[in-house]
Amino acid sequence: MVRRHFPGRAIVKVLTSHGYRLVGREGSHVRLRWDPPDQHDSAVRLVSVPVGHEVGGDTLRNIADQCGADDFDAFCTWIERNR
């Protein structure tokens, strides 16, 4: 079974190691930005992650959506494998 809860810091660590960069912080949330490479068909992606909490449920789904993930289970597996 795929794990569906992760520490916010682990999510930030994985995303920043894959091209996202920190662009701001508001309270317990950090904002990350991904700029697509040239010739890429995606738009800029902005992601908000609560870093002081265990993230799961709808919040984790929203993060996956903001990252452009088509498959939620594959996104969770990717986070687990890279954390």
Image: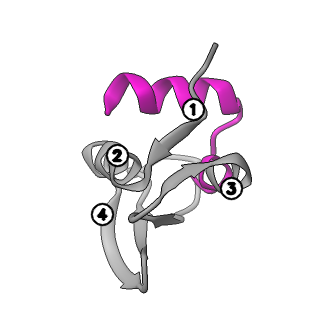
Above or below 58: residue 27: below
The residue that label 4 is drawn on is 21
What residue type is disc 2 on?
Ala
User: Relative to residue 23, is residue 1 drawn left or right?
Assistant: right
Q: Secondary structure at mark 4?
A: strand
Q: Earlier in the sequence, mark 1 or mark 2?
A: 2
Q: Nearer the viewer, mark 4 or mark 3?
A: 3
Q: Nearer the viewer, residue 52 or 47?
A: 52
Vertical comparison of 29 with 14: above or below: below
73 is within the stretch colored magenta: yes
- Rendered residue at 37%/82% (across/down): 25
Give the residue type that dot 4 points to: Arg
Query: Where residue 62 is drawn, which disc sits there?
Result: 3
Mark closest to the chain's N terminus, 2 or 4: 2
Q: Residue under circle 1?
A: 75
- Residue visible at 64% across and 13% down in the picture: 1
What's the CA distance linking mark 4 and mark 3? 18 Å
Cβ–Cβ under 8 Å for marks 4 and 3: no
Across and down, in percent, residue 83 comes to 31, 33
Residue 5 is situated, as x and y percent measured from the top left of the image, at 55, 39
Report the mark closest to the observer, 4 or 1.
1
Q: Amino acid at mark 1?
A: Phe
**Discs 3/2, front:** 2
What are the residue bounds of the magenta stretch? 63-83
Q: Residue at x 42, y 66 (%)?
A: 33
Q: Which residue is mark 2?
A: 10
- Helix, strand or loop for disc 1: helix
The residues tagged by marks 2 and 4 sit, at their Cα atoms, a distance apart of 14 Å
Q: Quadrant of residue 4?
A: top right
Neighbourhood count class around disc 4 (C-alpha, 10 Å): few under 14, some 14–19, many 20 upward? some
Give the alpha-carbon distance from disc 3 to disc 2, as whole Å: 16 Å
Circle nearer the N terminus (4, 3): 4
